[in-house]
Structure formats: C-alpha cells, structure tokens
Amino acid sequence: MSRFQDKVALVTGSSQGIGAACALRLAKDGCDIILNGHKFDERGQEVIDQIEALGRKATFVTADLSKAKEAMRLIDDAVATYGRLDILINNAGIEKNANFWEVTEEDYDLVMDTNLKGIFFSTQSFVKYCRQKNVPGVVINMSSVHEEIVFPHFAAYCASKGGLKMLTRNLATELAPFNIRVNNVAPGAVSTPINQALLSNKEQLEKVIQNIPLRRMGKVEDVASVVAFLASDEAAYVTGSTYFVDGGLTYHYEEQ
C-alpha cells in the first residue's frame, strides 16, 4: 500500500516551483491531486501530465486566493472533483519588493490578502468540510524563514509570514480535538523561478550561499519531502510546528 492510498490533496499555487514539486511528490506517494493557480496555462498542463504519468489523477481549479469567496469556493470545487479532500497545502503566495515608505495600500493589501487572508478562509472552508463529514484532515501552510528573520524591503511579506506562523499555532490548538493537524513549512533560499534573478547573478548567489551552513541553495524537492512527511501518518503526532527547510540559515542568522 502506498503512503497516501486513496487520498486526495489540494495544492495551491502549483503550476511551478515548490507547489508543483509538492504536488508531484504527493502523487508519487499515492495521492490524487487538485492543482490550483490564478490561471490555467501550459505550465499547469505539464504538471497534470507528469502526475498522470505516475498513475494518479489530476485536475486544475483556478481561483484568485486574495479573495475570500474564491478561496472558499476552491475547497468546494476540490471536494466536488473527487468526492473527498484529505490534505490541504496552502502554498500560494506573493511578495513585493519596495522600501517601507514606498509601499502602497494596494500592494500591502494584495500581499496580506494572498498570503494570509486567502489561507485563513480556504482553511476555514476545509475545516467545515472535515467537521461535516467527521473525518480527519491535514493542513500545511507554506511560510518562509522570514517568519523569523528580517528581510529589508519586504515588510508586508514578512508581516504576512509572521501572521501565518501564529495562525498555524492557533489553528493547531483549536482544531486538535477534531483530529485536524496544522503545520508550517518554512523554506529558505530555494532554486525556483521566482529566484531566477538571484540564480543568474553569480556574485550575489555566492553571498547568499556563504550564509547557508550547508553551502548550497535548496531544491524544490527538499521542501516537497518535508511536506510529504508532515502530510503522512508518520507525522500523526506533529501539529503546530514550523519545519525550517533552509540548510541551517535561520539558526546561523540568529547566531551572527
């Protein structure tokens, strides 16, 4: 029997990068997958094709997760697709690079709505489903090392991740009686499309790597492996935690 026999997982923001890697890893371990993004394009189709090549089912549901109604509707659509939903991976998120004094209300709202409000309401809808069906559930929120360490010029992003840390802890406590586990995964410097500018700048990349005790950038598969563990019964006694997947960056930063 596979790790996730007959289970269904929804992974938000899963057209590429960490989200796609999580979807593929869960599919490899036996999950049927609901992918999500703001729009469906060739990247989403490619992930679907890869999942189906693993012998699992996959579909794509669009939703703008900065809007509470769409975040809740996404859960309804996910449940309707395969008749059940066992695992929710809240991976979708955005960041905005700007001096603090130049951040607009529009940019602030977009970051907070996507990174925190959307997760709040998608999780709320998932919890309502689990309670209605009297079934256990797993929620994994994709945070960042910047829930703990500063990131100049990304004040709204850091605030959203700090808020996500406390949301996760609170939900883990409140939902434990219903056998719904909630955890954070906090990646550090990972090779993803969003970091392409950094990856192409050898001098800047070397500076980043020198601050990572393991002396390398993370791979999306590094993050996906931790997500798969937390989603599985192997982590049945783990809730309310943040797992840093950062090559030691957070600890090293705090020691400096």
Image (spheres, rainbow, N blue to C red):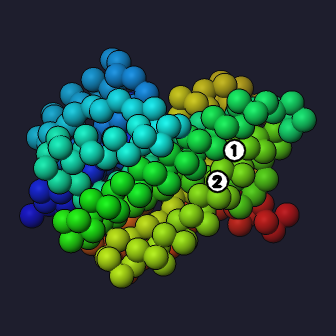
Marks 2 and 1 sit apart, C-alpha to C-alpha, by 6 Å
Which amino acid is tagged 1? Tyr
Above or below residue 188? Residue 18 is above
Location of residue 109 in the rendering, given as x and y in whole percent from the top left corner: 67, 37
Name the residue carrying label 1: 157
Q: Which residue is mark 2?
A: 161
The structure residue drawn at horizontal position 46% and vertical position 76%, both measured from the top left corner, is 174
- Element type at marker 1? helix
Q: Residue at x 36, y 54 (%)?
A: 125
Badge number at residue 69: none
Outermost residue on the right side: it is: 101
Secondary structure under tag 2 reads: helix
Residue 187 position, x and y percent, is 57, 52
Q: Nearer the viewer, residue 152 or 82?
A: 82
State which quarter of the image contains the C terminus.
bottom right
Whether 231 is drawn above or below 143: the answer is below
Left-right relation of 238 to 29: right
**What's the residue at 53%, 37% (across, down)?**
66
- Is the N terminus in the top left, top right, bottom left or bottom right quadrant? bottom left
> Eyeballing the image, is 192 above or below 136?
above
